[in-house]
Structures are given as structure tokens and as C-alpha cells.
Amino acid sequence: MINLINKLRNKYFKGCWAQILFFVVLSLLVIIGGMYGIGAWYRHSQASKPLELGVSFIPAYADSLGVDPQTTMQSLIDDIGVRNFRLVSYWDQLEPSAGKYNFSLLDWQFVKAEKAHATITLSVGLRQPRWPECHMPAWATNEPVSVWQPQLEAFMTQVIQRYKGSPALQSYQLENEYFMQGFGTCTNFDRQRLVDEYALVKKLDPSRPVIITRSNNLVGWPVGKPTPDEFATSIYRRVWNTNIYKGYFDYPVPAWYYSFIAGWQKIFTGRDMMIHELQAEAWPPNRQTVAETSLAEQNKSFNASMFQGRVDFAKATGMRQIYLWGGEYWYYRMVVLHDPSLWNAAKSEFQQN
């Protein structure tokens, strides 16, 4: 092999710069080959595990789309057959004034999941899925971190103590893409806060795994405390770009790259990875809401013909727990826009698995 490489180098890459280019290209091929090999190993190591499809569900998003949250969740259970949910515990919703808790919103979600014998991964902490990401109540907004962090931990304690007895509760997601600074209204990214919150959750409910979602899905090292029981990632394929140009942007990342991310993380930490957010809804342009965007425009970033392709892409990563992002949106398209195409595509996918 070495002789062959030297022959190719001497024949086709003559001169100093050509030699440098040769070694750069060779190094890239070796690196990419190694990455692909790690990804292939990870896919093979996970192949015997059962596939688990789930859905993130957020009542506030259903409300914003003009559909009833309880009817939406029940339809996801009864019609599509969802049996795995990622639910949220927004601080501003459940503790609207200091020390005054109202858990009715989350209670009915747990009741529905329990009746359906479904599982729940419960998001806890300040930063949770969907805009504005950090859901701090107005009464704590102007407080220094030395004041609101203990208040947040007291709230988290109330949440965990209330629901840890539920047979539906399978795991916790601690914060959501905690270190991501380019999205959301969050301002505090102190690692020690995350470490403290992790210790709190494990102390209150040591029997259940705690999941932490990577803050950057393309690069980053899985090092630094805390080391969760499992990592998670998000996968978005088509978004509206505003950085270089205004228009839709398709991430040119192959599925095997996510296999590599999961694989080398497994090597370094011994922990597996799951997909907590697989894009299965439209990404409106120019910071518009979905309700402000025409159906034709919505279809440019996500439509029924893309649905199976998204799920197939996720399966090809080798990760066996896949939570789709957009269940409320599928119901909105069917009920409000009279377009059941996404709902039917989701039903077909879940019934196959």
C-alpha cells in the first residue's frame, strides 16, 4: 500500500505544492475513512435494538396554531398510535407567581400518557424546547442568578417530586441544547449551573436516566461535566437561511456523519445517543410563524413526500430512539388547513413500526 501511494505521488504530484496537496488530500481521505468506519461500527452495534419512534408534544404550540391541545394529544395517541412522548415543564407556565404552582397543564398530559400505556421523557430546567427556549417567569426575570437559580431548583424539585411516581415517566431531558448561544433568549450558559441541576435531578430520582442534548449537532467534543446517562441530538435537514443569503438551505450532511458522532461519543464516554428532535414540520421564512405562512410556502421546507425520507435518514444514522418534531403541526395542517397529507404520512410511519 505504501509503495502504491508513493508511485501515485511521484507520478501525478510533482513539485513542492503538488506534494503538499497530495498529503492534504491523503490525510482527508484517511480522516473521512476513519469517521465512516466508526459510524459503520456504531450502526452495527445498535442494529439488534428495537426501533422506538416518539413525538415531542407542547400544548403552547398547539394553542398558537389554533388547535385544542388535549384533542391534539389524544389524536396522536388514538389515530397515529404514538406511545412515546417528550413533554415539557415550562417554568413560567407552572409557577406563574413565586411559590404558587399550577400543574394542571402537565397533569392531564401525564394522565393521557398513563391511560395509553405510553412513555414520557420529561424536559426539566430553564431551557426547554421551542421559542423562546428559556422559559423564565416574569417575576424572576430581573433577579440576579444568585437569586433565580435557587428558585429554579426549587421549581425543578416540585416537578420531579410530583411526577416521579408516574409509571409513564421513563427519563428526564435536562435543559435543551444548553450551550447554544445563537438561538433563543437565553443569557446564562454557566457550566456549573448545569452540573448542579444534574446532581439535583439524580438526587431526587436516581432510578431514571438523565439525557442531555448536544448544543451543536455538527461539531463538538463530548467532554466536560456532567456526563449524562445518555446524549441526544437534533437533526434538521431544511431551514431558512439568513446568514449568507436569504433562502432555504439544505444541510449537506450524510446520515453516516451522525453515526460517527454517536460512535465516537460512545467510545469516549460509553454513552449512547438518541434523536430528540427530527425535523418533521415546516421552517417558515423571514421569521414568520407557521400561521402567517401559506401552505404552498410551508411545503417548500416540509411536505408529505419528504416525511418518509426524513425518517429513513434518521434510521440510517443507527440511532434507535427517534422523536419527531411537529406532531401539533401535522394536526393543524389536517384540521385548520384541511390538508391531512402529513397526518397520514405519520400514521403510516408509526403503524409500520
Image (spheres, rainbow, N blue to C red):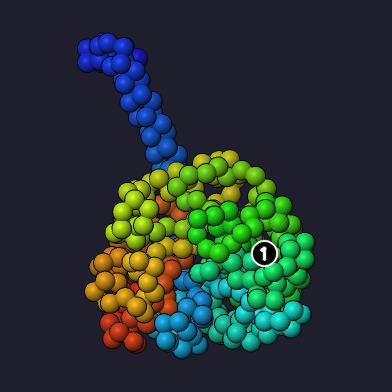
Residue 49 visible at all = no
Above or below, 291 against 24 in this view is below
Q: Of residues 13 and 91, which is closer to you in this image?
A: 91
Residue 210: image x %, image y %? 64, 60
Residue labelled with disc 1: 208
* Residue extending farthest front: 142
- At a point 73% along the width and 67% down the height, the residue shown is 143
Give SS at disc 1: loop
Residue 95 lies in quadrant? bottom right
> Is 122 left, or right, of 239 in this rendering?
right
In the image, what residue type sits under mark 1? Arg
Residue 319 visible at all = yes
Q: Of residues 187 and 274, which is closer to you in this image?
A: 187
Residue 43: image x %, image y %? 43, 48
* Residue extending farthest left: 12
Above or below, 224 against 129 in this view is above
Q: Of residues 323 and 246, which is closer to you in this image?
A: 246
Count of numbered badges drawn on the protein = 1
> Is 20 left, or right, of 101 in this rendering?
left
Callout 1: few (<14), some (14-19), or many (20+) C-alpha neighbours within 10 Å? Answer: some
Quarter of the figure with the N terminus: top left
